[in-house]
């Protein structure tokens, strides 16, 4: 299926390729104290183990997944969550829009033969058949997609590829201040990059990062899930502050 938004996708792909070459661990897990290459590999990977342990504990308390055969990490970056999932599932797939991130993931996780990493530069998951995975995870990824319509499309796809008896765990920003929606610094990065500016100059000297944040209201998420015939088992408020609100959803088939 050919994407209807090739320019948006190419821009997102370039921006995440830039981040993969500049500061990949911080781009994925943005602790302010770790910016500038300050993440150690073992310390960084330990955050994935903690996140996966927590979400699996919650999923198990809800009675899912029924099997642990296949898992999908959507927006895998360098495989922080994919690696942790590989200790719990027979097969783990990580997909990302950035070819550079995928190459890094393959290198970082070369000791995990049950991990497969793929580039997915489209607004769907056409490489996977429906009802393929027992667990689908997407944390702190969809919020960086450049349009609400595209986020909704991805959520529909995450639900489509999940088996009955499986569970989808995804996070989105459900609220944001209006003035922050202008994304001025990210837009400036994009304009200067398009004009030929070096990504390292923009990041190091000007302090610009191509992070885009797109909110999708909780009511919209609920409608999308209901329209797909699925069930929200749990909705967790991850963050609620003056600038934004973030929620994590646990959704099952049927």
Image (tube, helix red, strand yellow):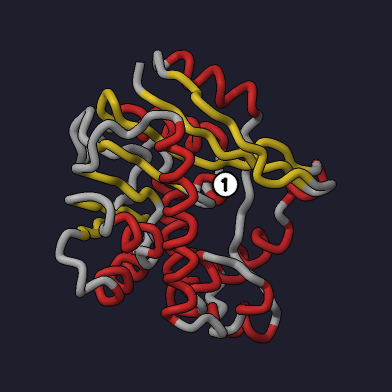
Tell me the quarter of the picture where residue 176 sits: top right
Q: Is residue 214 above or below residue 114?
A: above
Residue projecting furthest to the front: 61
Left or right: residue 47 compared with residue 206: left
Tell me the quarter of the picture where residue 111 sits: bottom left
Residue located 21% across and 74% down the image: 110
Tell me the quarter of the picture where residue 227 sits: top left
Left or right: residue 54 compared with residue 241: left
* Percent position of residue 166, x then y: 31, 31
* Percent position of residue 188, x then y: 68, 64
Image quadrant holding the C terminus, namely: top left
Judging depth in this view, the residue of 199 and 84 nearest the camera is 84
Residue under label 1? 143
Q: Is residue 18 visible from the viewing direction of this image? A: no
Residue located 26% across and 71% down the image: 109
Residue located 44% across and 62% down the image: 48
* Percent position of residue 94, x then y: 30, 55
């Amino acid at each position: 299926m050919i994407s209807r938004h090739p320019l948006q996708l190419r821009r997102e792909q370039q921006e995440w390729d830039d981040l993969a070459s500049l500061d990949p661990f911080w781009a994925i897990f943005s602790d302010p104290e770790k910016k500038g290459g300050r993440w150690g590999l073992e310390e960084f990977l330990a955050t994935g183990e903690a996140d996966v342990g927590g979400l699996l504990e919650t999923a198990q308390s809800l009675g899912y997944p029924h099997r642990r055969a296949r898992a999908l990490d959507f927006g895998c970056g360098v495989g922080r969550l994919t690696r942790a999932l590989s200790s719990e599932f027979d097969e783990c797939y990580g997909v990302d829009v950035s070819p550079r991130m995928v190459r890094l993931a393959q290198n970082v996780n070369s000791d995990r033969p049950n991990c497969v990493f793929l580039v997915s530069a489209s607004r769907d998951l056409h490489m996977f058949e429906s009802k393929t995975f027992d667990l689908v995870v997407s944390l702190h990824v969809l919020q960086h997609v450049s349009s609400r319509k595209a986020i909704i499309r991805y959520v529909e796809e995450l639900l489509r590829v999940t088996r009955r008896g499986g569970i989808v765990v995804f996070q989105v920003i459900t609220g944001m201040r209006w003035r922050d929606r202008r994304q001025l610094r990210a837009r400036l990065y994009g304009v200067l990059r398009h004009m030929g500016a070096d990504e390292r100059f923009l990041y190091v000297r000007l302090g610009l990062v191509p992070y885009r944040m797109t909110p999708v209201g909780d009511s919209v998420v609920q409608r999308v899930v209901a329209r797909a015939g699925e069930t929200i088992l749990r909705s967790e408020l991850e963050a609620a502050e003056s600038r934004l609100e973030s929620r994590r959803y646990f959704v099952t088939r049927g």
